[in-house]
Structures are given as C-alpha cells and as structure tokens.
Amino acid sequence: MPVSIKDVAKRAGVSPGTVSNVFSGNRAVKAELIERVRSAAAELGYETDRAASQLRAGKARVVAALVPDLNNPFFTSLIASIEAQVRDEGFDIIVASSHGDADEEARRLSALLAWRPAGIVIIPCSDEFASRNILADTQVPFVVADRVPSLFQGDAVTMDNIDAGTKAAEHLVALGHRRFVVAASTLKLQNIRERCAGIEAVLAKEGLAPPTLIEVGLDFDTATERLGVFMEGEQQASAFIALTNFATLGILACAHQTGLSVPRDISVVGFDDYSWMHAVSPPMTAIRQPVKQMGQAIWTRLRGHLDGRSEPASREKLTCELVVRASTAAPSSLGDTLRIA
Amino acid sequence: MPVSIKDVAKRAGVSPGTVSNVFSGNRAVKAELIERVRSAAAELGYETDRAASQLRAGKARVVAALVPDLNNPFFTSLIASIEAQVRDEGFDIIVASSHGDADEEARRLSALLAWRPAGIVIIPCSDEFASRNILADTQVPFVVADRVPSLFQGDAVTMDNIDAGTKAAEHLVALGHRRFVVAASTLKLQNIRERCAGIEAVLAKEGLAPPTLIEVGLDFDTATERLGVFMEGEQQASAFIALTNFATLGILACAHQTGLSVPRDISVVGFDDYSWMHAVSPPMTAIRQPVKQMGQAIWTRLRGHLDGRSEPASREKLTCELVVRASTAAPSSLGDTLRIA
DNA sequence: GTGAAAGCGCTAACAA
DNA sequence: TTGTTAGCGCTTTCAC
C-alpha cells in the first residue's frame, strides 16, 4: 500500500506536516489547503498509517480487551458495548481470549501490551488474576471487570453479586418456596460465591434450610447428573437458581430429562438475560446483568487516563435486575404430593 | 513504557540488531547471546513494539474482522473460531462492527485498513457490499464470508444455503407435513433467499403448496403479529422453518403466546445451533452452520496471501447439518381437528 | 555471526 | 499559518 503522507503532500502542493495537521486536527490549517489536501488524499486513496502515527506520537488509538471465552455471549456483549463506546472517538478494539487458562492469559496479555494500547480491559479467568503483575510493570491504564480480586486496588467494574443473589432468593421465597438448589458452573470464583452468599442470607433470615450448592461443570451430562438427584431424589427442591448462563441451561436440560415441568413442578431463576429466555416456553425469570452500563463504566475509567492524566483508581459496582417472567410460580402442593408419592 | 530494544541491547552487551534477530528469529544468533539477550529482556520486562516492528518490516501480524453485529452469537462465534486459528501463529485480531449500516461499514473498513493488517475478513451488512471498492484499491488480502455478492470474484467462504433449506424441508415432509411457513428476518439477503429456494424446490417436487414467506423483522412484537396469522388463522400451517436465529425465537415466542404446543400442534426447525436449543423443552431441531470450519477456511485463504504470495482467489461452500431433536414430529390429526373446529 | 547505520510513515519542535 | 527536520522503535542492508 504505497501511498504515504508525502505522496499526498506532493500532489496537494503542501508539506507533509500540513497533511498531518489536516488529518489529525492538531493545528489549524487554512480552509483552502484543507480542501486541497482532502481531495488529493481522496484521489490517491490515502489513509493515515496508524502504526506509524502511534509510533511517532506515542499515543495509541486502540484499546485491548482480554476475556476468558469469545463464545460466551456475556463476554462478547461486553465487547460489543465497549466497541460502541470507543468507536465514536476513533478508537479501535483488539480482542483476545485467554481460553480460561491463566498461563494463556499471561501470554495474551503480553502480546496485547506489545501494541502499546491506550488501555486494556480484562476479565481474568480466575480470582487470582496472577497476570496482573505484568500490567503493574507497565504504564498502560487497565480496568478489571466482572472478576476482581478482593484486595485489588486499581480500576474495576463489577456487579453487586450479593444483591443479585438476594433478589433471586427473595422472589422465590415470596412465592412460597422452601427448599432451594443453587447451580453454579464453579464455586472457585469470588463473584459466584457472592451470589451464593446473597441467597444464603435471605434463606437464613427466613429461617429456611440453607440451599444445596451444586457445581454443574461445563457439559450437559455432568450437569444433568448432579442436578438430577435433587429433582428426582428424596430431598426434592422446588426452587432452582442458576448463577451462570450455563447453569441455567443445565437446570432446564435436567428438568426436561427428568420430566419435570417448569414452573409447575419446579421454579427456575436463570442468570443473564438473553433473547431466547424471552422466547421459550415458559419465558424465563432471570437475573439480568447490565452489560451495556458495564461497557460504559469501563470506558469512562479508561478515558480518564487517556491523555496521561492520572486519575485516582475507582471501583464501580453495578446492580443486577430481576426480570420476572413465567418460569417461577408458587410451589404446587399437587406437585409435592406427586413427587413424594 | 520506556524500555526499547536499545535498552536490552545495552544491558546484554550486544547490538540492537542482534536483539531484533533473537526475537524475530530472522537470522541465526549464537546460543550464548540468545541467552544473554533473553535474560536482559526478561529483567527489563521488554516486549517488542508491534507498531514499530510493523512499520519497519512492512508486515503486520494482525488481522481485522468486520461484522454486522457483535451481539449476534453467530458472528462472534466466527470471530472466536478465527481467533483460535490465528493466535497460534502470533497474530492478533482487531474487530469492528458495521452495526448493519453500509455507510458505517465503509467507515469502519477504512479505519481497519489504516492498521495495514495482514488480512481482513468481512461479513458485509448487505449483498451489495458497496464498500468492496475500498478494498479493491488496496493490496490487503481479504475474504468475504457468509454474505457474498453473487458476481463476486475474490476469496469467499459461504454456506450451501440451498442445501440447508432442502434438509429442513425434506425432514418435515418426511414427517408428513404439508403446509409450511418460512420465517426470515429479511428476504433482502441472498443467503436467506437461497435457503427459501431450497425449501421451495422440495415442496414443489412433492407437489405441495409453496411455503408462506414471512419477514419477521427484528422485534418480538412484529414477529409475533406476523406469524400469529398462520398459527391461529384459517390457513394454519403445521411446519415452521426459521431461517435465522431471531426467526427461531420469533416462532417460539409466537407459539407460546398463541398457546400452541411444540411439537404437538406445530413442528419447528430452528436456525443456528446454540446451547439453549439443546436445553429447552422441547429440545430444538435445528440447522447447524459449521462455524468452526468457516473460521478455518477463512484463515486458510488469508494465510495463502500472507508472504506476498498471490494465490488465486478461491471460494468455499460449506454444508450445514440438520440436528434432529424434539421440536419436530409428525403432524397430529388431533391438532388439525381442534384448530379447524 | 555481529555491529553500524539507514530509513519505514508519521508527528512535533522549531523556524520562517 | 506553513515548511523543514529530527526521530519514535524497529528491521534490514551492508560491512566486517
């Protein structure tokens, strides 16, 4: 692509510096020259080389995003939200996936850093977030999202996970449920444990038995097997709360497999709110995370550091919303009778 | 981030050129020096500046992806697949969304080009793909995916959409269905029309009435309204085929709203195969697009052009698979009777 | 196999 | 307001 700023300058009869100023807007240029430069550039098909620009100016117009999994719609929605934020200001976004592995996370982080991005947003694959050392050595502003180490000091955007659990539990308690099962992909993550804590607190306050915690894993067979015990067995529960999207699917799959009807036999609160939850029968009651606001909060923080300003680190905790649809209902005594028989 | 190749060179007691060779592997370096350089780099926390490297070498280790919507899991799965391909070879991926708008597509494309990427993969927001002129002017290799203009000559990766429609229709015909409704988000796209054509051909061959084509739009209310006519009205259909993911949801939402049971009253074939289709009741029969293979085919083509090699343009057409689950069944005569009454 | 030096395309000082 | 020029960090001749 051999059309550089010099070619444009020659054709427009101005200096390279002027061309640069026309495109960057850094210094004022007479209207007439702007016009000449613009048309010369258009004729030649010129577009500023961002690598060169960034190298010289020392300012990158790109932000990097590192997430655990690009197949998880929660993460990609977040990327979508960030993309919508940054594009208006001429930034591009470079993405990478750690594939849920801490070593890979470290490697990808280094690779992203090599772009000298204006900022990095990272969703660590575990609470340890061991690779944060890598970031500490650099001057690149970064914000940690969703999974934030408890003692972490820097910029962070999270959910109020305790409140999320509380809302789900209160809703089900109000409907009259007394035995709860909580399904999570893994309890190794802080945010998941917080959601549990929220639920446990509600049940304790109501004098109900603590919920049964189940790690459903990441494949349907395991999930179904582990949940099945509490759908078919002696100690049936009537209320199921999912703490991740996959857990939602696991509960649904298991209910279908064991022939239980939702919400007649069991009530289910899903996690994350996707279109399919609205469309299926019954439409799912779910805890919705404010993905869009998350993206905004992230960009606000990154922006704060943009021109070398050193804003104080800040933490934002957003609240989830319980969307009530038809997968939750009062426990039917009929169902109870049938299952006990 | 003020640690450059010179700092490493000084510390290791070698020249900058040698450091460069150690990291790029372009020229052989004595084992002892490699060791010295590596440890010096590690101590300093040095990582090659990709912008500078790319500027000088004229070779980018980044590919760009432009899709219509980052909230659509089909597109993001494709990005995930491409990411998995390229990361092994040290490439990064920069993403952008055209937000379904042709002008924005052109703008974003120019912005992406400004990175001088090694290649671009684009899913146009319409068949026209007007912005292809922009690419034609450059030397950047690109491959068009999913939505490919019919007369397009370059590298492309698509689905065999006619076959996809055929498979869905044959499945339902074999079950005994005779009246079909086909739901699509829009019929403006070539690939959607091809899916229709596949269905129409099957029905024609069987001597059945042509399917009713419905554009469901992009919100549930519109979708439900338009589909409702054929679920409740005089000319009930028993077989519903969705041609996009949203159409699948539209059909399901409408069935739920009108109180029809799947598959007892109507059979539904969904489009795209997501986890939720596996988990809900009934599990959905669906047409699965081979997203992973698509990513591979795309990268194969891009790779072909990588070192300035000028491979001939090639087109790949992948085939979809029909995943049969429980949302399709033989039409029940009982259902027919009830609805006619 | 290694070092010295030129220069990729751009922007920012400095002159004019 | 515009032109001239140095140099960002790197890779790549060209010498040795």
Image: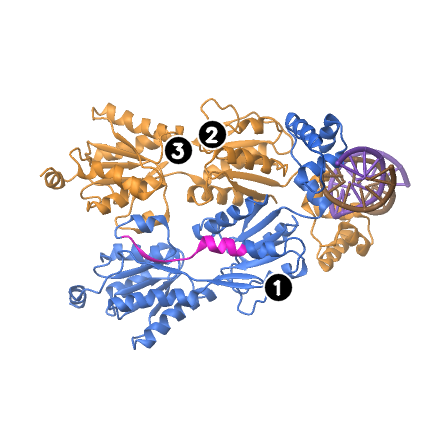
Chain colours: A orange, B blue, C purple, D brown
Q: Residues within 10 Å of mark 3 (few under 14, many from 20)?
A: some
Lateral position of residue A334 relative to residue A73, left or right? left
Residue B237 visible in the snapshot: no
Q: For mark 1, what is the residue?
A: B312
Which chain hosts label 2? A
Number of numbered discs: 3
Quadrant assignment for the N terminus of chain B = top right
Whole-number angstrom distance, CA of label 1 to CA of label 3: 53 Å
Q: Nearer the viewer, residue B25 or A294?
A: B25
Is A235 in the magenta?
A: no
Q: CA distance from mark 1 to mark 2?
A: 52 Å
Where is residue A140 shown, x and y percent of the image? 61, 31
Q: Quadrant of residue C14?
A: top right
Element under label 2? strand
Residue B56 visible in this rendered orientation of the protein: yes
Q: Which residue is mark 3?
A: A319
Q: Chain of mark 3?
A: A
Of the pair B112 and B17, the residue shown nearer to us: B17
Reply yes or no: does residue B284 show up in magenta.
Answer: yes
Q: Which residues are magenta?
A: B283-298
Q: Residue at x 61, y 36 (%)?
A: A118
Task: Give the residue pinned by disc 2.
Answer: A316
* Quadrant including the C terminus of chain B: bottom left
Position of A225 relative to B96 (above/below): above
Q: Residue at x 63, y 29 (%)?
A: A309
Tag 3: residue type? Thr
In the rendered image, residue B201, in percent from the top left (x then y), is placed at 37, 74
Amino acid type for the residue under numbered disc 1: Pro
What's the CA distance linking mark 2 and mark 3? 10 Å
Q: Are marks 2 and 3 on the same chain?
A: yes
- Give the image quarter of residue A17: top right
